[in-house]
Image: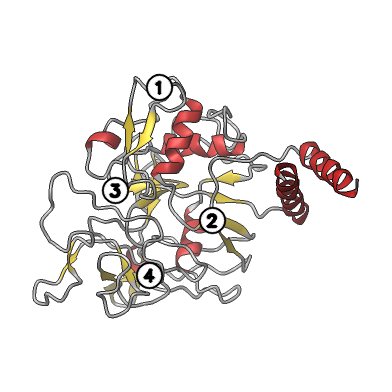
Amino acid sequence: MMKKTALTLLVGIALNCQVTHAAVIFDWAYIGNAGNAPDTPPTIDLGGGISFPTRDPHGAVAYDYRISKHEVTNAQYTEFLNAVDPEGTNALDLYDDEMASHGNGGILFDGGAADGSKYQVKQGRSNNPVVFVTFFDAMRFTNWLENGQGSGDTEAGVYTIGSGTDEVRNSNASYFLPTVDEWFKAAYHKNDGVTGNYWGYATSTDDQPYSDQPSGGDAPDPSNVANYNFDDIDDLNGYNDGYAVTGSPILADGQNYLTDVGAYSSATSPYGTFDQTGNVSEWTETVAGIGGNARDTRGGSWSGNLMRISTDIDYGTTPGSSGSLVGFRVASVVPEPASLVMGVLAMMAVALWRR
């Protein structure tokens, strides 16, 4: 009798709080040290005691937040596609044909499959970061998360979809795309209080990472390895031999150059994020470009241009563009303690119900 009463109570609490069991979940990194100082940008010396900074200072965030430890994956994006476009009409251009045809693409389309399963992950690509996504795609994915997933709305919630540069984050949003400051802090800040202390790379070091296949065991330091292109032609030693995945400086047609998110398991930022140096660059929420006609992208990619703090400049990418170099990750508010308790109770209710 007591078990039945407890079950009824827990189920009632769970239902009353409308806890949803989402198909897409994230492993979050908690970003504390609210009110930290920004970094000090490098300067260009013009001589005669005249110098100027190469960019604006970044990384100051006045609040605690969460950011996904990993980039959004093919598996997660496929769940999104099948949920919001079960008939495969692609009316919102959420699916790019190069996701199937390009070597780095990881999602297929099967028009003959049943509704809700027309989009399918390529074999072995579930945990690769999704690429060929525009800023519009990233916003719509985040709206979908905000609206409970499933058949949730894609056109509003966090961002009311407009031109690609006029959307502003809803101040009550639970999920969102990180700003440059939120992204930058998670990547480089030393996690040592409210200081303005930052590492040179998003692998918690000032030393340039090695280019090597996952998980970096051939390199001298597996905690400082990334997926990017670096060819040390004078030293063929099993690392720094070109593209990280192939160990060759030659770009091969049809080759997948992406690594699974978190594959470099020892190479993390001070807050515990992965791949903010290398793999794919990532969309941020920050408006950039001349006249505010673009959105900022951050981080290095598999093709080269390994991003370090001294060269992580303010760079705008047209919001409607996409390619094999750019993906995204999401950020979130820190849940209230009561929400965490309700989530635990809901899981207990489901466990008891199954028993």
Q: Which coloring applies here?
A: secondary structure
Residue 32 image point, x, y percent: 61, 66
Residue that appears at 13% across and 45% down: 253
Q: Secondary structure at mark 1?
A: loop
Q: Which residue is mark 2?
A: 27
| C-beta proximity under 8 Å, tags 1 and 4 | no
* Label located before the other in sequence (2 or 3): 2
Residue 184 image point, x, y percent: 46, 61
Residues at marks 4 and 3, CA–CA distance in whole angstroms: 19 Å
* Label located before the other in sequence (1 or 4): 1
Q: Which residue is mark 4?
A: 201
Q: Which mark is residue 325?
A: 3
Residue 248 image point, x, y percent: 13, 61
* Label located before the other in sequence (2 or 4): 2
Camera-near label (1 vs 4) is: 1
Local crowd size for mark 1, using a 10 Å CA cut-off: few (<14), some (14–19), many (≥20): many
Local crowd size for mark 2, using a 10 Å CA cut-off: few (<14), some (14–19), many (≥20): few
Identity of the amino acid at label 2?
Asp
Residues at marks 2 and 4, CA–CA distance in whole angstroms: 22 Å
Q: Secondary structure at mark 3?
A: loop
Q: Which residue is mark 1?
A: 88
Can residue 120 be seen from the camera position used here? yes
Residues at marks 3 and 1, CA–CA distance in whole angstroms: 25 Å
| C-beta proximity under 8 Å, tags 1 and 2 | no
Quarter of the image containing the C terminus? Answer: top right
Lateral position of residue 227 relative to residue 342, left or right? left
Camera-near label (3 vs 1) is: 1
* Label located before the other in sequence (1 or 2): 2
Residues at marks 2 and 3, CA–CA distance in whole angstroms: 23 Å
